[in-house]
Image (cartoon, rainbow, N blue to C red):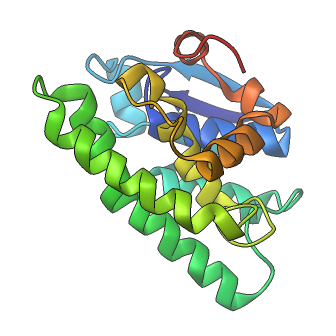
Amino acid sequence: MIKLYSSGISPDSHRTRIVLAEKELPVETFELDEDNLPSDFMKINPYGKLPTVIDRDVVFFEPSVVNEYLDERYPHPPLKPGSPAERAQMRLAVMRIEEEVYPLHYNLVRLKKKSEPSKKMKAYLASLDGYLANQVFFIGEQYSLADISLAPVLWRLESNGISTIDWPNLEAYMDRIFERPAFERSLSEHEKMLRDSL
């Protein structure tokens, strides 16, 4: 059985919980407080990174690495596109989301003055809305790790004071990814409380 060390409030941990739910894999989950990691966990992962996955006694961490490993090790259903070009596009998308969108999210959460990070997040979302006018998912027609990387941040927009009402393509996309049964199963108790309903 896979062991998952996860934070119930972290979008990074949420990403891996979505992958595990999509794969319907048997998993033993240990919810940890990122600011107070127990010593037994630090022996497993001295870097103290969540999520951390143990599969067949091998320890993996960093969400994009963990998620690609899980998709390759447990290939059904696939969460990467079929062609090399689309897989490269997906990896670029995941990298851009990690480098650009996640810092915006964390600035919204941490900074007392939210006007600047809010403005930057809204600019990104407006651009994303235009992109999604002709897209079912982030990379063409197939739900992938790119969508999974973006979903936790989008789920948290409302609780960070950002409305998506002005972006109909984005809202339709959010409906598509949030209505997936695996997404609902992936939510921690904290995450369920962030929005009124699915």
- In the displayed orientation, state which residue is furthest to the front: 166
**In this orientation, does residue 11 appear?**
yes
- In the displayed orientation, state which residue is furthest to the right: 76
Q: Position of residue 82 (x, y in %)?
A: 81, 80
The correct choice, above or below, for 104 with respect to 44 in the image is below
The correct choice, above or below, for 180 with respect to 158 in the image is below
| Residue under the image location 62 percent in, 50 percent down | 148
Q: Quadrant of the N terminus?
A: top right
Residue 38 lies in what quarter of the image?
Answer: top left
Question: Which of the pair 9/32 is nearer the observer?
Answer: 9
Question: Which of the pair 112/132 is nearer the observer?
Answer: 132
Q: Quadrant of the C terminus?
A: top right
Question: Which of the pair 60/156 is nearer the observer?
Answer: 156
Q: Position of residue 22 (x, y in %)?
A: 80, 43
**In this orientation, does residue 103 appear?**
no
Q: Position of residue 94 (x, y in %)?
A: 50, 64
The correct choice, above or below, for 191 with respect to 115 in the image is above
| Residue under the image location 71 percent in, 45 percent down | 172
Q: Position of residue 196 (x, y in %)?
A: 62, 10
Question: Which of the pair 3/57 is nearer the observer?
Answer: 3
Residue 133 lies in what quarter of the image?
Answer: bottom right
